[in-house]
Amino acid sequence: MRSRFWIAFLASAFLVPVNAALAQQFPGKVVRIVIPFSLGGSNDLTARVLLPHLIERWKQQVIVDPQVGAASTVGSAHVARSAPDGHTILFTSTQYAYAPITFAKLPFDPLNDLMPVTLVTTSPQIIVAHPSLPVKTPKELVAFARARPGELTIGTPGNTLPTLSFLSLAKVKMEPIPYKGAGPLNIAVMGGHVSLGIGAISSWLGTIQSGRVKPIGVCSLERSPLYPSAPPMAEAAPGFEAVAWFGMFVPRGTPPAVIKKIRDDIADILKDPAVIKGMHNIGGEPSGMPTEEYARFVRSEIEKWGKVAKAAGIKPQ
């Protein structure tokens, strides 16, 4: 027993300086931040706020690497197969929690193949409409939809779970239409190809400000300080809440010291007033959540949306 104790003690004593050395050496080459969505969406915009600060801090080239397809699973699987050294980072969204609910077979295991690093930002989702739709508020929208069951369409940037939750709580019928990210969905709503769109505030601010789409309501229980003029959709769909989140993961096996360095550096950058302003400008609320807390958060999100899917009768396909 004593010999086993000393073996464990010596092994842990050896790992401490090794982990410290790994953290000091990171990054030793180009860092790729993989975005599993089309460019122009919330993940892309948020990553580009961080980019110059990461380059300055790490003294290395940091690039955004879009790996788009299959509702974000292509990019996630790409990172899961990458070398576990911290140089390939997945920057994804709430879609990560939807994946195991949507797909019966995934090319990666969300709970085992990737390791949480930190929550970067959160952003209440918002429902917007083409300017021609004759409604301005959540209650007007629900009344209009109830009078015309099935006539309206609502585009989603990937998964339809938040939309289905809204339709159920509001007791209305609309056709959900998924798009490959916020960029294509923005174009569809602006062009009148769909009546409505749902997604993170950060992905809609530009088109709202230009007048090419109009906000109906935020998908939080109360008004959001990020967009206080929009009433909550819960006024017409009691209990409805859908907050988008954006966070980072690395491949399983990445040294803990490297994960800690990435998380600590991100959290420190998110305290910079210029970064906070930049995030607010695109509708994001900075976080920098500790890794263990973030891991629990991701699990709770998977459980939450799993219950929504079950209530809606959705089965993985």
Image (cartoon, helix red, strand yellow):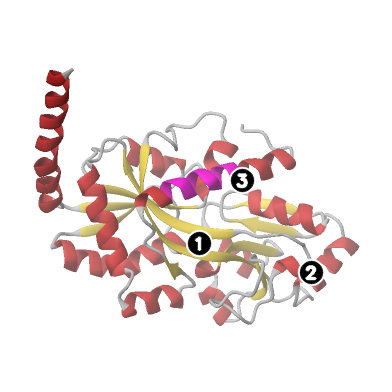
Name the amino acid type tagged 1.
Gly
Whether residue 59 is visible to the viewer of this picture, yes or no, is yes
* Disc number placed over residue 183 in the picture, else none: 1
Pointer 2 residue: 141
> Taken as a whole, is the magenta stretch helix, strand or loop?
helix
Q: Earlier in the sequence, mark 2 or mark 1?
A: 2
Q: Amino acid at mark 3?
A: Trp
Q: Disc 2 and disc 1: Cα gap in Å? A: 24 Å
Question: What range is drawn magenta here?
Answer: 294-303
Seen in the picture, residue 215 relative to 93 is either above or below; the reply is: below
Name the residue: 39% across, 79% down.
Answer: 277
Near-viewer residue (40 or 101)? 101
In depth, the one of 200 and 265 nearer the eye is 265
Please determine whether, in this image, residue 135 is positioned above or below residue 260.
below
Evaluate if marks 2 and 1 touch, with contact meaning CB atoms under 8 Å apart.
no
Direction from residue 145 to residue 109 in the image, left or right: left
* Crowding near the residue tagged with mark 1, few <14, some 14–19, many ≥20 C-alpha atoms within 10 Å: some
- What's the residue at 75%, 77% (across, down)? 136
Give the left or right position of residue 273, taking residue 214 as reference: left
Residue 76 highlighted magenta (yes or no): no
Q: Which mark is residue 305?
A: 3
The residue mark sitting in front, 2 or 3, is 3
